[in-house]
Image (spheres, rainbow, N blue to C red):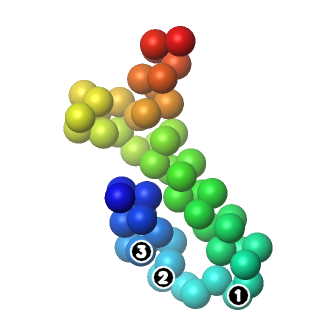
Amino acid sequence: ERVNGILKTELLLHRPTDLKQAEQMVREAVLIYNQERPHLSLKYKTPDAVHRALG
């Protein structure tokens, strides 16, 4: 759900011109979600940081 929120509120301020650009926007949203945004439920760590700590 949060990735959809990122797409709606931050990345889709401009309509993609084609499918390739739309795919890039989705990849960017997932990257932001996993690598840049801390999550309250993860004690303000990113999902990637938590995953690496478990591995």
Position of the N terminus, as image quadrant, is: bottom left
| Residue 16 image point, x, y percent | 64, 83
The reply to whether callout 3 and callout 1 are in contact (CB within 8 Å) is: no
The reply to whether callout 1 and callout 2 are in contact (CB within 8 Å) is: no
| Residue 50 image point, x, y percent | 42, 23
The reply to whether callout 3 and callout 2 are in contact (CB within 8 Å) is: no
**Residue that numbered label 2 is attached to:** 13
**Residue that numbered label 1 is attached to:** 17
Residue type, numbered disc 3: Lys
**Residue that numbered label 3 is attached to:** 8
User: For this view, does 25 lie left or right of residue 36?
Assistant: right
| Residue 45 image point, x, y percent | 35, 30
Disc nearer the start of the sequence (3/2):
3
| Residue 13 image point, x, y percent | 48, 82
Which mark's residue is nearer the viewer, 1 or 2?
1
Please report the residue visible at 59 percent of the width from the left and 63 percent of the height from the top. 26
The picture quadrant where one finds residue 24 is: bottom right
Residue type, numbered disc 1: Thr
Residue type, numbered disc 2: Leu
